[in-house]
Structures are given as C-alpha cells and as structure tokens.
Image: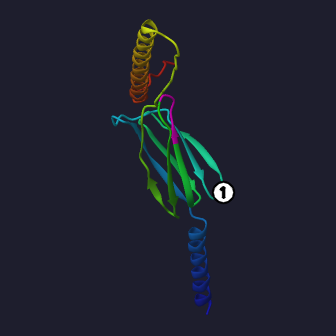
Amino acid sequence: MKKVAMFLGLLALLAGTSAYAQIGGSANIGGSITDDSGAALPGVTVTVTNRANGRSQALVTGGDGRYRAVALQPGPYQIEASLQGFGTVRREITLVVGADASLDLKLGVASVSETVTVVGVGEAGRLHMERFRKTFSQRFDQRRRQVLVEQKLQASMATWPRSRSAA
C-alpha cells in the first residue's frame, strides 16, 4: 500500500510539472539582419513587441548582424528593425509555447527626396537647379556608400581578437 501511495504521489508530481510547462512555457525568436547586398548589418535596433500586452524589449544586433530574444510569452508579436541610413522594417509573427522561431530581415537604404519649386526663373536658374540636383544626388550616394563601408568595418572589427594587456 505504501508503494502505491508513493507511486501515485510521484505521478501527481510529474503531471503537475508537465501542466506547468504547458501553461507557463515560453518562446524565443532570433535571426539575422542584412542589407540589400546580403551583408550583415551590426548595430541595428530590433524592437520585439508583444501585441497582446504591449510589452516590448529593444535589442541591438552584434557584429554578425544577428539578434535573439528569449523567454518570451507566447502570443502575437511585432518585430521592428531600424538603423540610421536604412529604412525601417516591421514584421508580424505569432509565437507558441516552446517555439524557437527564426525571422531574418533585410533593410534597404533609406530614400531621401526633396522637392524644390522655383517660379519665374530663366535659363540660368534652370541650369543652377540642375547642378544642385546633381550635386545633391552625388553627395547622397557618397554618404550611402560611406555608411555601408562603416558598418562592414564595424562588423569585421567585432570578429578581431582583442589584445590583452600585460600585467
């Protein structure tokens, strides 16, 4: 009789922990963030927001462009990734208990547009505006390339071994 009671007690304990795992379980999400060329983007701010309760957490991608959020409450989420010089991307995903979801994102270069309206200007004004438009476009392209180079440099520096100072 004592063995039966012990067995039933052990069975109840196991059933209780199994039910707790199902009720109180969590989920994870992670992935990589790249630019249009497929290069990893370090320093991207990734915000993971639970749409059911509004709770959010902000993460920053590492040198390899990867992010990971763990121990999330199951439910609907919005994942938002943004980086200066690039557009913002938002995706929706529903996480279930025990999920280890993967969500890779691609950020495109941000577009800048400016409209200038000039009224009553002759040929000289039109030529000046054309030169302005060309110069602005060239400078924007140079800045965009500079941002990409800086981010690739940061990504490669993150993989460099760090030197130890002699003590």
The dominant secondary structure in magenta is loop
Using the image, determine if residue 46 lies above or below residue 156. below
- The x and y percentages for residue 13 are 61, 77
| Residue shown at the point (58%, 90%) measured from the top left | 4
- Quadrant assignment for the N terminus: bottom right
Q: Mark 1 points at which residue?
A: 53
> Within the magenta stretch, is there residue 24?
no
Left or right placement of residue 42 versus residue 76 in this view: left
Q: Residue at x 52, y 60 (%)?
A: 95
Alpha-carbon neighbours of circle 1 within 10 Å: few (<14), some, or many (≥20)?
few
Query: Residue 17 in the image: x percent, y percent?
Result: 59, 72
Residue at 52% x, 20% y is: 117
The picture quadrant where one finds residue 101 is bottom left
Residue 145 drawn at (x, y percent): 39, 22
Question: Which residue is rendered at x = 44% and y = 23% of the image?
Answer: 147
Tell me: residue 52, above or below residue 21: above
Where are the magenta residues, as a range?
Answer: 81-85
Q: In which quarter of the image is residue 131?
A: top left
For badge 1, the amino acid type reads Asn
Q: Where is residue 167 in the image (x, y as percent from the top left)?
A: 52, 19
Does dot 1 land on a helix, a strand or a loop? loop
Question: In the displayed structure, would residue 11 be above or below residue 103?
Answer: below
